[in-house]
Image (cartoon, grey):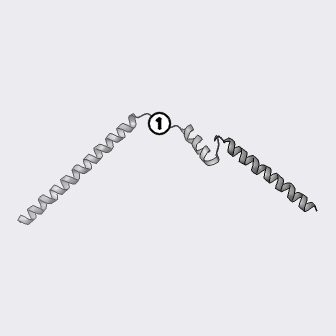
Amino acid sequence: MLLLQKQLAQYTKVISHVWDIANKAREDWEGEVSTRATQAQTSSAADTHALLAAVGMGKGLKVSYNQKKKVYLNFKRAIVWALLLKYIYQM
């Protein structure tokens, strides 16, 4: 009988400790929720859409002079190759 009483006391102690932990976690969570409710919104749907458009399609991104120059040179090379191939196939 003494063993049963010790086990019951330990069981009660463990349950009490778990209950305290759960209550503390609930109180912390409720505190976080109320804090979030009082904070001002830091983002906007328009900013999110602009970011997605920039990342997904490059929309609104500035091109540097070097990048423009590379694109121009590649375009120029493509035209030269196209003219060369046209000349070769006409022979």
Residue at (82% x, 56% y) in the render: 81
Residue at (93% x, 60% y) in the render: 90
16, above or below 4, in the image: above
Residue situated in front as seen by the camera: 64 or 14:
64
Most extreme residue toward the left, as rendered? 2
- The secondary element bearing badge 1 is classed as loop
Q: Quadrant of the C terminus?
A: bottom right
Most extreme residue toward the right, as rendered? 91
Residue at (60% x, 47% y) in the render: 55
Q: How many residues crowd mark 1 within 10 Å: few (<14), some (14–19), many (20+)?
A: few
Residue situated in front as seen by the camera: 78 or 6:
78
8, above or below 28, in the image: below
87, above or below 36, in the image: below
Q: Position of residue 43 (x, y in %)?
A: 50, 38
Left or right side of 69 for 20: left
Q: Quadrant of residue 35?
A: top left
Residue at (65% x, 40% y) in the render: 62
Q: Mark 1 belongs to which amino acid?
A: Thr
Q: Position of residue 19 (x, y in %)?
A: 22, 51
Residue situated in front as seen by the camera: 52 or 35:
52
Circle 1 residue? 42
Q: Quadrant of residue 47?
A: top right
Q: Position of residue 11 (x, y in %)?
A: 16, 59
Q: Quadrant of the N terminus?
A: bottom left
